[in-house]
């Protein structure tokens, strides 16, 4: 498998398990942080998904490079609000991913 170069786009997928009954509050804070991230250099896209059973949130963010993503995460404005998140979540599992090319994709209908 080829090693990712520093200049390639990167995807971070984070699975969050909020404390019982706190999914909506955690989603609100994550949406606020997503709006902040969207204004940072290198941002490409973000999607938030909440599980129907209320136990998980999945955050999928695409960035131009690993370095620019790390820079956004280290910014004081981002870190300042993130401590609130620790009080409403249990498990947080962020991981970096690269796409896998597996052939033709379904085309959207025009």
Image (tube, rainbow, N blue to C red):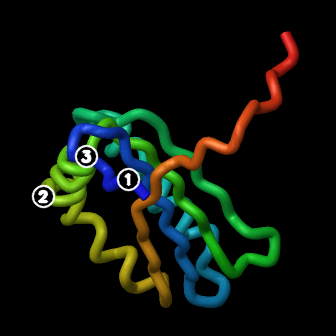
Q: Name the residue under label 1.
A: 2
Q: How far apart are marks 3 and 1 (CA)?
A: 9 Å
Of mark 3 and mark 2, the one earlier in the sequence is 3
Q: Residues within 10 Å of mark 3 (few under 14, many from 20)?
A: few
Of mark 2 and mark 1, the one earlier in the sequence is 1
Q: Residues within 10 Å of mark 2 (few under 14, many from 20)?
A: few
Judging from the image, what secondary structure is the residue with disc 2 in?
Answer: helix
Q: What residue is at 32 percent from the left and 51 percent from the top?
A: 4
Left or right placement of residue 55 versus residue 48 in this view: right
62 lies above or below 73: above
Left or right placement of residue 17 versus residue 106 in this view: left
Residue 17: quarter of image: bottom right
Q: Mark 2 points at which residue?
A: 76
Q: What residue is at 66 percent from the left and 58 percent from the top?
A: 49
2 and 1 marks in contact (CB < 8 Å): no
51 lies above or below 97: below
Q: How far apart are marks 2 and 1 (CA)?
A: 34 Å
Judging from the image, what secondary structure is the residue with disc 1 in?
Answer: loop
Q: How crowded is mark 1: few (under 14 residues within 10 Å), some or many (20 or more)?
A: few
Relative image position of residue 92 (x, y in whole percent) = 45, 80
Q: Which of marks 3 and 1 is in front?
A: 1
Q: What residue is at 53 percent from the left and 75 percent from the top?
A: 16
Q: How far apart are marks 3 and 2 (CA)?
A: 27 Å
Left or right placement of residue 83 versus residue 53 in this view: left
Q: Name the residue under label 3.
A: 5
């Amino acid at each position: 498998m080829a090693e990712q170069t520093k200049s390639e786009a990167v995807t971070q997928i984070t699975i969050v398990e909020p404390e019982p009954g706190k999914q909506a509050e955690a989603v609100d804070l994550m949406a606020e942080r997503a709006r902040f991230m969207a204004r940072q250099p290198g941002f490409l896209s973000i999607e938030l998904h909440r599980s129907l059973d209320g136990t998980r949130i999945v955050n999928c963010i695409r960035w131009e490079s690993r370095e620019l993503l790390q820079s956004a995460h280290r910014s004081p404005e981002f870190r300042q609000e993130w401590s609130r998140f620790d009080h409403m979540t249990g498990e947080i599992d962020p991981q970096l991913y690269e796409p896998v090319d597996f052939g033709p994709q379904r085309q959207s209908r025009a």
